Amino acid sequence: MERLQKAIAGFGYCSRRKAEKLILEKKVFVNGEMITELGYKVSANDIITVEGKTLTQEKKEYILLYKPRGVVTTTSDEHNRKTVLDLLETETRVYPVGRLDYDTSGLLILTNDGQLANLLMHPKSQVDKVYITKVKGLVNKKEILQLRNGVTIDGFKTSKCGARIISYDKKTDTSIVELTIHEGKNHQVKKMMASVGHEVIKLKRERLSFLTLKGLKSGEYRYLNIKEVKKLYNEVQKNKD
């Protein structure tokens, strides 16, 4: 038995949060009965209908996308901007795991596997997220140490992280810095760099766990193979335990 919203996410219909919203909006039925209780539990034999559609188990898909700048990490956009789904050719209803800002590029996972998505986004999973950022000014060793030990943003102190200076361009007065973090707070990297006095000009996620952008150009994607999926599961479950 599992909670209804988790089961809906597991079918790949939508995220767990969206499923909770649909339940409260009286758009979810189990065995023909309307359900409005978020704690309602279902079994594998129950028939779940959402927005008039009876859910069936889709084949799981795992997509690694090199998200370009100027694309939103949503399944739809009220301002008619291009979304990450516009870059894919798939009949399967996948959704992004976490998000990258509109002006941020880099590695993004999309899947219809709700269990893996929840594990990857769980705070205890401690998945490495490696970002390359271009910032204004010369970043010094003292500031790097501050970043490594954690800085306070929006009343929240970030966990210890990896931080190193890659290069400094004296002509443009800009630095390239690599940050390896585990959390996923809103605009976290930008706020971390701002906390030590540097405005982010450009930001790219280079790596997620062991996955990289190798072989992909901006806007391109590939499917994860079964070995990669199993390795991801092992990684997040090990860290969570």
Image (tube, rainbow, N blue to C red):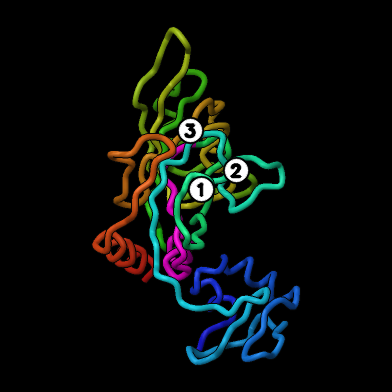
Q: Are marks 2 and 3 in contact (CB under 8 Å)?
A: no
Disc 2/disc 1 C-alpha distance (Å)? 7 Å
Residue 5 highlighted magenta (yes or no): no
Q: Are marks 2 and 1 in contact (CB under 8 Å)?
A: yes
Residue 115 highlighted magenta (yes or no): yes
The local secondary structure at tag 3 comes to strand
Residue at numbered disc 1: 158
27 horizontally vs 137: left or right? right
Q: Label 2 crowding class (10 Å Cα cut-off): few <14, some 14-19, many 20+? A: some
- Three-letter code for the amino acid on which mark 3 is drawn: Leu
- Total marks in image: 3
User: Residue 11 location, x and y as percent?
Assistant: 50, 74
Which numbered disc, 2 or 3, marks the residue closer to the eye?
Answer: 3
The local secondary structure at tag 2 comes to strand
Q: Label 3 crowding class (10 Å Cα cut-off): few <14, some 14-19, many 20+? A: many
**Nearer to us in this view, 215 or 207:** 215
Q: Are marks 1 and 3 in contact (CB under 8 Å)?
A: no
User: Residue 215 location, x and y as percent?
Assistant: 28, 39
195 horizontally vs 64: left or right? right
Residue at numbered disc 2: 153
Disc 1/disc 3 C-alpha distance (Å)? 18 Å
What number is the disc on residue 218?
none
Residue at numbered disc 3: 203
Q: Which residues are magenta?
A: 105-121
The local secondary structure at tag 1 comes to loop
Quadrant housing the C terminus? bottom left
202 horizontally vs 74: left or right? left
123 horizontally vs 59: left or right? right
Disc 2/disc 3 C-alpha distance (Å)? 18 Å
